Structure formats: structure tokens, C-alpha cells
Amino acid sequence: MPRPEPTYINFEIDGREVSAPEGELLVDAAKRGDIEIPYFCYEKKLGAPVGACRMCLVEIEGMPKLQTSCSTPVKDGMVVTTTSDDVKQAHNSIVEFLLINHPLDCPVCDKGGECPLQDISYGWGPGKSRYIEPKRHFKKPLELSPLVAIDRERCILCYRCVRFSQEISEDYQLVFLDRGDHTFVGTHDGRPYVGPFSGNIVELCPVGALTSTAYRFRARPWDIEDAGSVCTLCPSQCNITFTVRDDAKVMRVLARDNEEVDDGWLCDKGRFAYQAIAARERVTAPLVRDGGALREVSWERALSEAAEGLRKAGERSAAILGGSATNEEGFLAQRLVRDALGSPHVDSRPSGVLSSAHARVLARPDLSARVSDIDYASAVLVLDTELIDESPILDLRVRKAARRNGTRVVVASSRPSALDPNADAVVR
Ligand code: SF4
Ligand code: SF4
Ligand code: FES
């Protein structure tokens, strides 16, 4: 399936001429002209919009009523206004409405300072409320899962977490329960929400309703800094941002959206394994076995002992590189073994050596593909691997391709796979 080639059109927004791909949703197209439209329920990576919150209303010339910009594709010659009195009145009303049952407990909310509801209330809200009746109350916070706490009073029922569960990870656990102003998010069977991608809902939630058990109340936005990095816990290499406190402590891992690599998601291993960095069991200083017991020594002593051991082994040395080594580490290891120690024994493949003919075929440029090519593939063959374990983020890609573009999936593996229900054919 070829990638769609966008056709660019011109439209006007708040008096500015803007060029955007035809069919792009207005809420995204507006950003190309540096115009910010507030929104809650819309999230590009969740797929088709649901138009649930009405926060993104704008005026479009020729249309009698305000339109939701998250579900309106942009067209050539469209004239859009986001600052008219009618639009301002609508934004004010929606914010006032959403805050009717919101506890407004920002000072003690873990999301305070990095909360879209807080920002949009300041930027587009009326600054006051006419509502004096008692707000709804829920028991809080509760464990939605061992990793995620839920404060139901703060939820604005935007559907994001539920859509993630239903349409992205396809675990079908999260639903809205009850009706009207009693509606709340939960699992359909009341059990904890457990899945390999559950942490994504914390980042998706535009309010402080869903918080990370491992992070909550450990830092405020003004205590922390961001450091971009890449997850090394599997070959997917998802782009991440470390939340760092006091220049040293990793407090949290967030997605650093890269459509070409991770599509903006992380698996729970990548999101929560940072806690191991500060684990007491970690070896943080060099140890040398001395008289049968391990003893902490200086780096100089440890390196000279290691060099001595390798020198003695010489060409009888061998190196096996693990899957989490980087290309650079692999290159340096083979230099050490081949050039310095004179040994040819270096490998990284658990299943033996590939013949050079095979290696040449696999290196052919016309056989290589980008991760994002999966989105547009006519068919995907999953060959003897369980993506959930080996490269979790690719599991979501394959699901997305099958769900949104009708990509045909064939799973050929020796054991049952989590992708079996999505497969057009399973060979075992
Ligand atoms: S918990 Fe958060 S993400 Fe889920 S519906 Fe409520 S506000 Fe939206
Ligand atoms: S799939 Fe998970 S473990 Fe693999 S790179 Fe992405 S976040 Fe890390
Ligand atoms: S963002 Fe458009 S209706 Fe919610």
C-alpha cells in the first residue's frame, strides 16, 4: 500500500493565511499558523476523534453553528475564527461546565503545574463559577492498577484512557461505568487494570485523575528537568524523556513522541523500569573476587585486574554481546577481542552464525523498511516471535495497521501469540 501523498491547500484562520495538508483536522492545521485551539478529548495518536468535550469549538464562515475543530477536516478557502465573542462565550461555558464537578484541588494534585485543565481554565475559562451546589464525591485515590492511581472526582470524562484500552492496546479492560454525573472510569469486571501498556493512560489523562503510583508526590514541575534519551530495554529504541530531579535522580520516564519509532507510546517495562536505577541491589562500584569473596576496589585496580585476565587469555578469549548493547559498544568490543586479543570469537546471535549469502540478502536496501512502513503495509508476517515480549511497541504498530488500514496479518510462530486474534491466518 503506497503512503498517501498529501495535497496542500490554503485556508484562513484569525486573519492568517495558512497552508496545510487537505483533510488535516482543523485543530492540528491551526498549529501551522501558530494558532492554539484548546482541546481535551482529542489526541492525534488515538485515531479518529470522538468530539466528546466540545472544548475545541470554532467559527467557520458559512456554517450556522460553532464547529468542533477536532473533527472538522480543513478545506481549501475555509475561513476560521477562534477569537469571536461567540467562540469565547463557548469556551468560557465549556470550562465552567467541566469544572462544575471538578474539585479544583490543584495545590494538592500531582498534575498541578503540568495540567492541561489548569492551563485551559486560565487561558480560556471565565475565571469564576456560578455553581454553588455540592460537587460529586468518590472514594479516592484508588488503585486502578498496581501502577496507576485514580482520583475519580478529577475526571472530566474525556474518553482518552478508555479509548486507549479499547482501540490502541486492545485489552478492552477500561470502560465508563454508571450514567450521567455518576459516570466513572473503571475496569468492566472491577479487577485491576493490568496490561503491558497500562502506563500510557497516565500520560494521556489531561487532568490529575490518573497518576503514576511510582511518581506521585515525589516532585513538582518546578523541581524537575527533562532529559531526552532512548529506551534500551528492547530493540525498539522508543524515544523517552527522563524526568530528573537535583541533576541526578531519575524520577519518571515519559514518551518523547516519535512517529517513526514508537508512535508516541511506551510499554510499561520502558516506562517503569527506571526504578531499578536506584535499587539497592545494583552494583554501583567495581568488585574484585579476592580470596573467594567479592570486595569493593578502586576503578584503577579493577581495570588492571580485568586487563591482566584478558591478556592472559589472549586468543582464547571470546565475547558474546547482549541485545541491549549499542552499535558503538558492539564495535568497541569486537575491536578489543579481534585486534587487541587476536581472537575471532565474537558474536551476538543466540541462534548461530548467519551464512554470508543470507547476511547479504538481508542487507539489501530494497528489502529494508522503516517501522512506520508497517502502517501502510498490505500485509505483515510475524515470523516466530512474540512481539509483546521481544519488541512490545511493534505489537501496537501491527494492531494499528490491521485496525485502521486493514493490513492483513499472518502469525507464523511455534507458540500462541497475543496477535492471534488480529491475524487473518495463524500458522503453528
Ligand atoms: S481518567 Fe483522565 S483520561 Fe480517563 S476519562 Fe477521565 S479525564 Fe479522561
Ligand atoms: S518497547 Fe518498551 S522496552 Fe522496548 S524500547 Fe519501547 S519502551 Fe523500551
Ligand atoms: S477536543 Fe474537540 S470535542 Fe473534545
Image (tube, grey):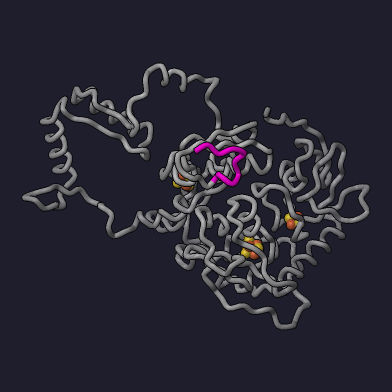
Query: Which quadrant of the figure has residue 342?
Result: top left
Snapshot quadrant of residue 340 = top left
In the picture, measured across the screen, residue 140 lies left or right of residue 39, that is left
Pick the residue in front: 260 or 3. Answer: 3
Q: Looking at the picture, how far across and down is residue 322, in whole percent? A: 33, 38
The residue segment tinted magenta is 419-428
* Residue 101 image position (x, y, % from top left): 70, 74
Is residue 395 visible in the rendered structure shown here?
Answer: yes
Against 238, is 138 above or below? below
Q: Nearer the viewer, residue 14 or 215?
A: 215
The residue sitting at the front extreme is 428
Q: Does the magenta stretch include residue 304?
A: no
Quadrant of the rendering where the N terminus is positioned: top right
Total residue callouts = 0
Q: Residue at the location (37% across, 24% down)?
A: 354
The residue depicted at 82 percent of the width and 60 percent of the height is 88
Q: Which of the pair 3/255 is nearer the observer?
A: 3
Residue at x 37%, y 54% (from the top left corner): 248
Residue 422 counted in the magenta span: yes
Q: Is residue 118 visible?
A: no
Residue 203 screen position, x and y as percent: 57, 56
Give the percent coordinates (x, y) of residue 345.
24, 26
Is 390 placed left or right of 278 in the picture? right
Q: Which residue is painted at 71% across and 31% down in the image?
A: 4
Occupied quadrant, residue 191 = bottom right
Quarter of the rendered image showing ligand 1: bottom right
354 to the left or right of 42: left
